[in-house]
Every structure is written in C-alpha cells, then in structure tokens.
Image (tube, rainbow, N blue to C red):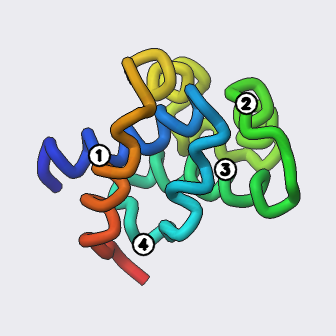
Amino acid sequence: MTVAARAAEEHVLGAVLLEPERWQQVADLTLTNFAYPEHRAVFATLAELAGNGGDLSLDAVLERLTATDRLKVAGGEAAVRRLRDDTATASTISHYADVLRQTKHGP
C-alpha cells in the first residue's frame, strides 16, 4: 500500500471522528475500500453506529470498539484518538473519499 492510500484512509476516518455529520459524505464506502485492518475496524464500527442511528462521537466509537472486542485490532485507544487529533480539517473529506472509492481490497 502507498503512503497516499494510508493517508486517505486516515483522513476519511479522522474527518468523521472530528465532524460526525460528515458521515453522509462517505457512507457509500465499504470495508473493501480500506486496506488496513485497523482502519477497517474503525470504519465497520462507524457504519454500525450510523446504521443504528447512533452517536458517531469519538467516545461512542471507542465504547463500541471495546464492546465488540475490536479496539486492539483498531490499534488501541491512542491510535483511534490520533485519527481525529491528526486531522486538521474535515473539509477535504470528499477528495480523500474519492481516492478510496477508486480502490478495492479483498472480498
């Protein structure tokens, strides 16, 4: 995987954690758009919460990752927090989501 692909995944996830209302801009993505297991775990959790009309805040995502035994796969609490904290702005989420839409990984 390229550094650019990893950065695109991190930005999309971080942008949603930063501004949960941005979920609608990436809701069409699937797990196959994510190459990294830690990112797949976070995206799956966001999708589950959103599908149930749930809260997409960082705390809610961390709680759900813990409850579903995916926090370790996601890289731990610090790694998930870093996704949000390292995202300066959510305004470019569409660009990075478009990059991910052009990629498919695994089944």
| Numbered mark located on residue 57 in the image | 2
Question: Where 46 falls versus 90 (above or below)?
Answer: below
What's the residue type where badge 1 is placed? Answer: Ala
Label 1 – label 3 distance at C-alpha: 16 Å
Mark found first going from the N terminus, 3 or 2? 3
Label 1 – label 4 distance at C-alpha: 14 Å
Please tell me whether mark 2 or mark 4 is closer to you in this view. Answer: 2
Mark found first going from the N terminus, 4 or 3? 4
Indicate left or right for 47 with 101 as reference.
Answer: right
Q: Which residue is mark 4?
A: 32
- In front of the other: 14 or 106: 14
**Which residue is farthest bottom?**
107
What's the residue type where badge 4 is placed? Answer: Thr
| Numbered mark located on residue 8 in the image | 1
Q: Which residue is mark 3?
A: 46
Give the residue displayed 38% in from the left and 18% down from the top: 88
Label 2 – label 4 distance at C-alpha: 23 Å
Mark found first going from the N terminus, 1 or 2? 1
Location of residue 36 in the rendering, given as x and y in whole percent from the top left corner: 37, 53
Label 4 – label 3 distance at C-alpha: 15 Å
The crowd level at tag 1 (other Cα within 10 Å; few <14, some 14-19, many 20+) is: many
- In front of the other: 15 or 91: 91
Give the residue displayed 72% in from the left and 41% down from the top: 65
Label 1 – label 2 distance at C-alpha: 20 Å
Label 3 – label 2 distance at C-alpha: 9 Å
Element at label 2: loop
In the picture, the quarter occupied by the N terminus is: bottom left
